[in-house]
Amino acid sequence: MSATTESSFYPLSNLKHPFLKKIYKATGNDTTVTIEFAIASAVDCCFIGLTNASSAVLRLYSATDVLLATEMLNVSTNGNVFTKVSGVSYCTIGFSATAPVYVGNIGVGESYTMPDPLAEVIPDFVDNSEESISADGQLIVNKVEWLKLVESSYFVDNLDDYNYIYALFRSVDRPIWVAHFENTADTINPLYS
């Protein structure tokens, strides 16, 4: 992985950290991050977490530097799922912002649609704010932004599908992005876990 600019205080290596708040930060308002794949891969999604970018453009390339596809990413909903492109050896993501660009994580790869969701996803909110009362009766509240709790389950009706899904998740050594249902990005952004 490489980038056109990089702050020494927020290096590009931070993108490999599991916590989104450990960001990579560029030194300018525009930067390009290049990600190389170990082997030529199929790519049909790109997700971006915790960024101030106002726009992002994904470009997919072959091993011979042929541009295979260009996708405008929706930074307000954390990214896109698009038509699968095969033979991708590396990609670049160009970010633009009104201040030096920062990014918490990038996920580029192949999506998988889980079969048969069993329940409708209804976002529930959890308030993790802390309250403390002093001996004199003063109330201090440490407000924390509400977290969304989304519960869902899926029905897998045969062992081969189960084993495939299990192997898929076991093979990922990095955090994954989960988009619970198709076409819900406006109400439920993909989750980073």
Image (cartoon, grey):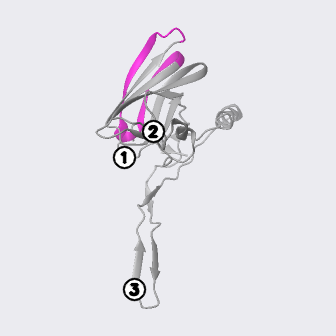
Single out the residue that lies furthest toward the left: 98
Asked if the magenta segment contains residue 80, the reply would be: yes
Seen from the viewer's position, the closer of residues 48 and 86 is 48
By secondary structure, the bulk of the magenta-drawn segment is best described as strand
Label 2 Cα neighbours within 10 Å, binned few <14 / some 14-19 / many ≥20: some
**Residue at image mark 2:** 7
**Residue at image mark 1:** 187
Residue 50 rendering spot, x and y as whole percentages: 43, 44
Residue 181 rendering spot, x and y as whole percentages: 46, 40
Query: Looking at the picture, which amino acid does disc 3 mark?
Result: Gln
Q: Which mark is residue 136?
A: none
Element at label 1:
loop
Label 1 Cα neighbours within 10 Å, binned few <14 / some 14-19 / many ≥20: few
Q: CA distance from mark 3 to mark 1?
A: 38 Å
Seen from the viewer's position, the closer of residues 127 and 181 is 127
Marks 3 and 1, the one that precedes in the sequence: 3
Mark nearest the camera among 2 and 3 is 2
Magenta stretch bounds = 63-89
Seen from the viewer's position, the closer of residues 4 and 34 is 4
Cβ atoms at labels 1 and 2 below 8 Å apart = no
Q: CA distance from mark 2 to mark 3?
A: 42 Å
Please give the name of the residue rendered at 53% of the width and 49% of the height, measured from the top-left corner. 152
Marks 1 and 2, the one that precedes in the sequence: 2
Residue 150 rendering spot, x and y as whole percentages: 49, 53
Seen from the viewer's position, the closer of residues 126 and 103 is 103
Please give the name of the residue rendered at 70% of the width and 31% of the height, measured from the top-left corner. 160
Query: Looking at the picture, which amino acid does disc 2 mark?
Result: Ser
**Residue at image mark 3:** 138
Q: Is residue 134 above or below residue 126?
A: below
Element at label 3:
loop
Query: Looking at the picture, which amino acid does disc 1 mark?
Result: Thr
